[in-house]
Amino acid sequence: MLRLFAAVGTAALLAASAPTLAADAKPNDAQIAHIAYTAGTLDIAAGKQALAKSHDKAVRDFASEMVRDHGAVNDRALALVKKLGVTPAPNPTSAMLKAEAYKERDQLARLSGTAFDKAYVANEIAYHKTVNGALRDTLIPSAQNAELKSLLQTGLTLFAGHQAHAEHLAAHLK
């Protein structure tokens, strides 16, 4: 239960910070790029942690999918910012994402077996739900560059599939 609260806490932090950033001043493309890239990098790290710790084939397959898909989107994002000559700008939202993800990673590191698998998947559900909401409600509407906006929309479609996959996986782990 503690794991679920931590996962929801991380998700709530992202949900709270993205609208705050938008309310104070819409994030610019450099900030959006940094937030999106950071979120992807953090999910890659979580997937790698699951690959190292989990012995459940379905969880390992899901973690492999996270590493592969988020890596591919981040590679496209890096190519785009290079093409556009944009330097992703660190910001409070990406900093909070990192801080909370590191706490979550440390907490997951203390778990093993089914407890780890359930906590990892619960975190993935909460994380994708929140990232998808931030993409849909804040990042995509704020993006000015059409190519960046398109990449974010592609990511949202892919990550909505990740959320559904994680929700299905959670049912398998009960």
Image: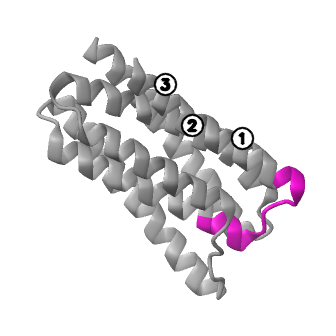
Give the residue displayed 53% in from the left and 70% down from the top. Answer: 77
**What separation in Å lies between label 1 and label 3 (alpha carbons)?**
16 Å
**What separation in Å lies between label 2 and label 1 (alpha carbons)?**
9 Å
Q: Are marks 2 and 1 in contact (CB under 8 Å)?
A: no
The x and y percentages for residue 163 are 47, 33
Is 147 inside the magenta-drawn segment? no
Q: Quadrant of residue 85 in the image?
A: bottom right
Magenta portion: prevailing SS class: helix
From the viewer's perspective, tell me whether residue 171 is left or right of residue 99: left
Work out which quarter of the rendered image holds the N terminus and state it: top left
The label on residue 30 is none
Q: Quadrant of residue 45 in the image?
A: bottom left
Mark 2 and mark 3 lie on one chain; the one further toward the N terminus is 3
Task: From the image, tell me which residue sits under label 1.
Answer: 16
Work out which quarter of the rendered image holds the C terminus and state it: top left
> Within 10 angstroms of label 3, few (less than 14), some, or many (20 or more) residues?
some
The x and y percentages for residue 154 are 58, 53
The x and y percentages for residue 158 are 50, 45
Q: In this view, does 75 lie above or below 48?
A: below
Amino acid residing under circle 3: Phe
**What separation in Å lies between label 2 and label 3 (alpha carbons)?**
10 Å
Give the residue displayed 16% in from the left and 47% down from the top. Answer: 52
Amino acid residing under circle 1: Ala
Secondary element under disc 1, as helix, strand or loop, is: helix
Q: Give the range drawn in magenta.
A: 22-34
Mark 1 and mark 3 lie on one chain; the one further toward the N terminus is 3
Q: In this view, does 101 lie above or below 173?
A: below
Task: From the image, tell me which residue sits under label 3.
Answer: 5
> Within 10 angstroms of label 1, few (less than 14), some, or many (20 or more) residues?
some
Task: From the image, tell me which residue sits under label 2.
Answer: 11
